[in-house]
Amino acid sequence: MSRRTRRAAEPDPAAFPTRPYDLLKEFTIALVAVAVLTAGLAALFSSPDEQPITLATWSAATPNDFTATAVTELGGTSTTAQYGPPYNHTPGAGQKIGPVGLQRAAGVRIPVDTAEDFVLRPLRQAPEPAEVSAALTAWTAAPADRQQAWTSAYSDALGKAPDGDPAKVEPGDYGPVPVLTSRLLALAQAGALDGQLLAQGRFYQTDYTRPMLFLNDGTYLADQARAQHLAGDQWGMMNETGNYPGQAWLWLYTFWYQIDPFKTSKNADALIWALMAVLSLAFVLVPFIPGVRSIPRWTKVYRLIWRQHYRGQR
């Protein structure tokens, strides 16, 4: 083929329709429209700027709940103390899928001793009055069963006191527990306990695991979540505070917690995780599943998507 023939076979740009296009004008219009929509929707649906919940805010808002929780941490009866892996080696704890214990398979990777980490070490690290130092010495010298008896008796007494107020507890054999928890409450209200639980001997103190576990063992955090419609049975989800727009893309995951057998199962987290893994894998493998991969061809949905193209062909 000669050069002249090849040149003749090339399309002539003049044969195609053209129209003027002002790129700067289109960009300006799009920018202004997006800015107006962003400002308008933010003003209409903005969420309140809630302050973070800390041990200091919790202990100031509901000191009785903080004290009752501190007693369970000291006695090893809190949710965290009995959670099992990855925090501790509580026998029988942990979720399973069939005979496979997922938490135990992962092991204890974040060891937490609630009595030592949440109560005793913070008290030792803070300058203590003589009364508190004597209480620490008495606690350390007592055998484990004696410690358990003290915390159990004091926990029961708090439950019977009006409003759970430590000041209204009936006299009893509580050992050093009232002194220890009272001093811990004072540290928390002063804001010192937050820093002490964050201090892990590292340069960057950004691991909030222990403060969050302590908070979660009480009722204050759960009450705040329910007030914001974030409890599990309220289907609440959000990226930040408030109740709009929320993480709507998580609906499929949270949906399973609302139906049986998941909502009544002790292994709900493990079961739903496994179910979502199977569903996600099935979604990824759609192009390779016979029958399923042919649904677009059978329904001809592609003709709806590319309708302008097929209209031009006709």
Image (tube, rainbow, N blue to C red):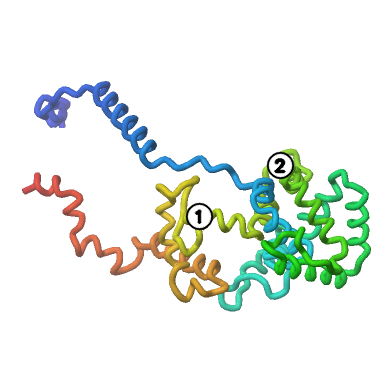
Q: Residues within 10 Å of mark 2 (few under 14, many from 20)?
A: few
Q: Secondary structure at mark 2?
A: loop
Measuring from the top left, give residue 65's x and y in whole percent: 67, 58
Identified at 64% across, 67% down, the residue is: 103
Measuring from the top left, give residue 296's x and y in whole percent: 24, 60
Identified at 14% across, 45% down, the residue is: 308
Q: How far apart are the two marked residues, 2 and 1, measured between alpha carbons?
A: 30 Å
The three-letter amino acid code for the residue at tag 1 is Ala
Chain-order first, disc 2 or disc 1: 2
| Residue located farthest toward the bottom when viewing the structure as drawn | 99
Measuring from the top left, give residue 50's x and y in whole percent: 53, 43
Identified at 13% across, 31% down, the residue is: 9
Measuring from the top left, give residue 4's x and y in whole percent: 13, 25
Q: Is residue 15 visible?
A: yes
Q: Quadrant of the N terminus?
A: top left
Q: Nearer the viewer, residue 118 or 288?
A: 118
Reply above or below: 120 against 75: above
Left/right placement of residue 21 relative to residue 100 reads: left
Reply above or below: 64 against 159: above
Which mark, by number, is residue 21? none
Q: Secondary structure at mark 1?
A: helix
What residue would you read off at disc 2? 205
The three-letter amino acid code for the residue at tag 2 is Gln
Which mark, by number, is residue 227? 1
Identified at 61% across, 74% down, the residue is: 100
